[in-house]
Image: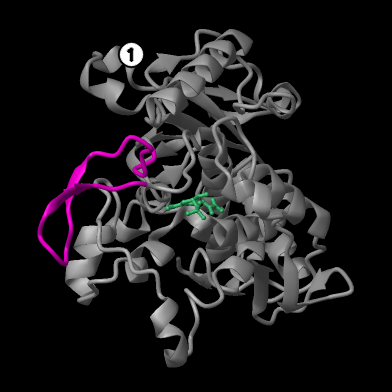
C-alpha cells in the first residue's frame, strides 16, 4: 500500500480483534450501518460452523471519526470476541494461567501449524493457529468496507459472487453487474445461479457427513474506475499485481486470476485481446473485457474482474494423518468444530480487500488531505482524459 497503511491485530479466541488505519482524507461521510452489514454478511453462508453462532460482529470505532465524518487522523476499529469468555484462561496474557493452556501438539495438514511452529519455535501450536485463523479477515472486511466509501462517493461500485463449489461451476451467464446485489441477497451461497446453489448445498451436506470440506471459486468486480490507476513504469506499481497479492493474502486462497486469467494460455491472440473503439460521448473504449480492466498494470476504464481459488478448509472432521510435534508419533487429530465451506464469506472478504487496494491506488493518484481536495483532483483529471 502506498497512501493507506493499516495493521490488524488479535488472536481468534483472544479478547479483541482490531485494526488501525492511516491515510483517509478528512470529511468523508461514513455509513457505520454499512460496515456492520458487511461484517454480519461475512459471518453467514451455507457451510459455516458453530463459531459463527456465538459471535455477532459489530464494530466499535475508537478514533478518527466524529459526528459521522473522518477527521483525517488514524482510525482505530475493534470487535470483541464473544467466545473469549470460554477462552480467557487458555488465551490469558498472564503467566499464572499457563497451567490452563490446553496445548495443541498435532499440526493439521494444510494449516500453518507445523511451518509456523518450527519457524517461531513453539511446540504449543495454538500460538500459531490462533493468529493464522481466518477470524483475522473480520478486521480486513471492517477496514475495507470503511475505505471503499471513498470510492463509492465517486460512483465506483463493487460486486462479488461465488462461481464454483466442490468442482461444480455455475452454468448461468453472469448477469448485468448492477443486478447482482438483488440476485444474491436471498442466496445462502452468494450466487445468482439457483440450480448451482441446489447442487452445492447438497454437496456441502454430503461433505459434512463425510467429515470433509469443499473449496471453490469466487469473483470480484469493480465498475466505474477511471483509466489510469496503477502504472507500467515499475514492477511494484502495477495495480493488477498489487491486487493479486491482496487477494492471495486471504487465508486459504491458492490462485488468483484477472479477466480471462489462465485461459490466455489456451487461446489465440485474436480471442485474448480487446479491440479499441472511439465514440464522441464515451471517448476511447474496449469492445470486450478479456483483460479484466487492466493493461500494463494500469486500469483501462473497463470493469476490474478478479477471480480467486479457495482451497477446502483444512480442519477436517475426518482428519488426515499427521505427526505429534512432542512425541513424533503419527496421529489423527480429533476436532471440536469447523466450517465445511466458506466460499460465500471468502467472496465478500475479497470484495472488501479489492476495494481497499483500489482505494489506495485512487488516493495515491488523486489524494489530498480532505475529500474536497480529492474531488477537485479527480474531476480535474476526468476533464483532462476527456480532452485527450
Ligand atoms: C478457523 C476456525 C473456526 C472458524 C474461524 C477460522 O473457528 P473456531 O476454531 O473458533 O471454531 O470459524 O473463522 C472465524 C472465527 C471467522 O470469524 O471467520 C480457522 O482455524 O482458521
Answer with left or right where residue 96 lies relative to residue 333. right
Residue 304 appears in the rendering? no
Residue drawn at x 30%, y 13% as measured from the top left: 270
User: Dividing the picture into quarters, in which one does residue 272 lie?
Assistant: top left
- What is the x, y in percent for residue 313? 39, 40
Is 29 placed above or below 205 here? Answer: below
- What is the x, y in percent for residue 327? 13, 64
- Secondary element at tag 1: helix
Closer to the camera, 302 or 348?
A: 348
User: Dividing the picture into quarters, in which one does residue 367 lie?
Assistant: bottom right
Residue drawn at x 53%, y 65% as measured from the top left: 364
Q: Is residue 159 magenta?
A: no
Residue drawn at x 42%, y 65% as measured from the top left: 130
Cβ of disc 1 within 8 Å of ligand 1? no
- What is the x, y in percent for residue 297? 37, 46
Q: Is residue 317 magenta?
A: yes
Is 352 placed above or below 90 here? Answer: above
Give the magenta range.
313-334
Q: Which residue is mark 1?
A: 271
**Helix, strand or loop for the magenta stretch, by majority:** loop
Q: How is the image coloured?
A: one colour
Amino acid at each position: 500500500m502506498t497512501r493507506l497503511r493499516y495493521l490488524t491485530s488479535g488472536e481468534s479466541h483472544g479478547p479483541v480483534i482490531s485494526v488501525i488505519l492511516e491515510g483517509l482524507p478528512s470529511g468523508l461521510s461514513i455509513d457505520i450501518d454499512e460496515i456492520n452489514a458487511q461484517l454480519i454478511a461475512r459471518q453467514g453462508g451455507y457451510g459455516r460452523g458453530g463459531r459463527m453462532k456465538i459471535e455477532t460482529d459489530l464494530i466499535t470505532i475508537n478514533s478518527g471519526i466524529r459526528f459521522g465524518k473522518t477527521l483525517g487522523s488514524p482510525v482505530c476499529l475493534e470487535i470483541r470476541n464473544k467466545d473469549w469468555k470460554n477462552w480467557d484462561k487458555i488465551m490469558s496474557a498472564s503467566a499464572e494461567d499457563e497451567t490452563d493452556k490446553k496445548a495443541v501438539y498435532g499440526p493439521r495438514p494444510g494449516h500453518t501449524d507445523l511451518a509456523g511452529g518450527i519457524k517461531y519455535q513453539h511446540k504449543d501450536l495454538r500460538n500459531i493457529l490462533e493468529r493464522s485463523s481466518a477470524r483475522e479477515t473480520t478486521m480486513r472486511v471492517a477496514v475495507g468496507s470503511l475505505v471503499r466509501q471513498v470510492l463509492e462517493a465517486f460512483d465506483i461500485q463493487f460486486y462479488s459472487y461465488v462461481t464454483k463449489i466442490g468442482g461444480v461451476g455455475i452454468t448461468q451467464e453472469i448477469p448485468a453487474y448492477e443486478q447482482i446485489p438483488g440476485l444474491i441477497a436471498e442466496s445462502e451461497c452468494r450466487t445468482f445461479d439457483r440450480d448451482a446453489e441446489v447442487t452445492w448445498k447438497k454437496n456441502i451436506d454430503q461433505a459434512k457427513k463425510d467429515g470433509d470440506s469443499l473449496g471453490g471459486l469466487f469473483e470480484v468486480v469493480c465498475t466505474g474506475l477511471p483509466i489510469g490507476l496503477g502504472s507500467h513504469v515499475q514492477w511494484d506499481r502495477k495495480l493488477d499485481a498489487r491486487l493479486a497479492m491482496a487477494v492471495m493474502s486471504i487465508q486459504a486462497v491458492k490462485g488468483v486470476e484477472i479477466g480471462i486469467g489462465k485461459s490466455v494460455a489456451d487461446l489465440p491472440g485474436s480471442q485474448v485481446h480487446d479491440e479499441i473503439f472511439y465514440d464522441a460521448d464515451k471517448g476511447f473504449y474496449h469492445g470486450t473485457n478479456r483483460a479484466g480492466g487492466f493493461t500494463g498494470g494500469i486500469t483501462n476504464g473497463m470493469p476490474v474482474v478478479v477471480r480467486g481459488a479457495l482451497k477446502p478448509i483444512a480442519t477436517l472432521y475426518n482428519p488426515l494423518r499427521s505427526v505429534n510435534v512432542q512425541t513424533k508419533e503419527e496421529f489423527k487429530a480429533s476436532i471440536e468444530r469447523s466450517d465445511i465451506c466458506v466460499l460465500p464469506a471468502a467472496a465478500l472478504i475479497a470484495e472488501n480487500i479489492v476495494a481497499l487496494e483500489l482505494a489506495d491506488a485512487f488516493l495515491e493518484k488523486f489524494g489530498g488531505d480532505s475529500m474536497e481536495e480529492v474531488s477537485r483532483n479527480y474531476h480535474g483529471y476526468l476533464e483532462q482524459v476527456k480532452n485527450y
